Amino acid sequence: MKKTLLIFAKAPIAGVAKTRLIPALGGEGAANLHRKLTTSTLTMATQHALFPVQLWCTPDTEHPHFLQCKKEFPVTLHKQSGRDLGKRMAHALRQALQKNSYAIIIGTDCPSLTQEMLQRTFKLLDNNYDCVLIPAIDGGYVLLGLRQFSAELFTNIEWGTEKVLHTTRERLKQLQWRWYELPHQWDLDEPKDLARYNRININ
């Protein structure tokens, strides 16, 4: 069965990347941390080359950081398309599932994600789960794995709020899909998350 991993990333532009961390780190510091997180995520995801990895970029694929990522890692670059996060995710996953049996989408702001979690997600999808989620402690999710596509999972959802996971679960019930949730993880969004990140000393 063909499978692929999609990684969503913004260009590390000061004042645009990781904006909620700017009060603690400043614009340049937040952008530099975002660059570091992207590189760490790609390092984790491409270990052992177990599955193809697509890096979905915004605002485009031509930023020097993304071009450097393509040189350093076995990834293909793709441009995100859509007015909000839901439309951009839907566009990417629809394309991926036209060519693959399973697809997983993640961001770059969950330092605790491991390749073992990705492999387990693919195994669950192979065992006839329609969807696999890794919930985030803040009420969203840090990973979504699918074996089929539905726009319902990405439409009229209040992205960036604590309602995302609840709404997604309700949509899965309405679709009558069989889904599985792996243990909660934390993501690096707010200044309060920096202490935990620094404590585990992820490089």
Image (cartoon, rainbow, N blue to C red):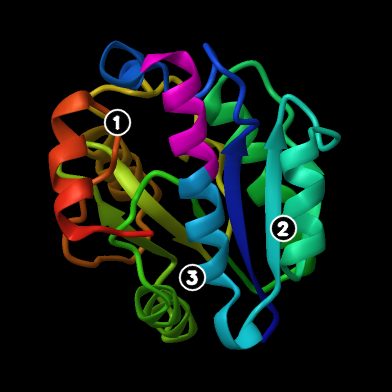
Please identify the quarter of the rendering in which residue 139 is found. Answer: top left
The numbered disc on residue 96 is: 2
Tell me if residue 107 can be seen: no
SS label for mark 3: helix
Image vertical order of residue 112 relative to residue 4, above or below: above
* Residue at horizontal 39 percent and vertical 55 percent from the top: 143
Of the pair 55 and 182, the residue shown nearer to us:
55
In-image side of 93 versus 159 (left or right) = right
In-image side of 13 versus 133 (left or right) = right
Residue 116: say if magenta: no
Between discs 2 and 3, the one toward the N terminus? 3
SS label for mark 1: loop
Image vertical order of residue 144 relative to residue 62, above or below: below
Please identify the quarter of the rendering in which residue 12 is found. Answer: top right
* Residue at horizontal 18 percent and vertical 59 percent from the top: 200
- In the picture of the structure, the residue carrying the numbered disc 3 is 44
The numbered disc on residue 189 is: 1
> The disc labelled 3 sits on which kind of residue?
Met
- Judged by its main secondary structure, the magenta piece is helix
Boundaries of the magenta span: 26-35
> The disc labelled 1 sits on which kind of residue?
Asp
In-image side of 18 versus 70 (left or right) = left
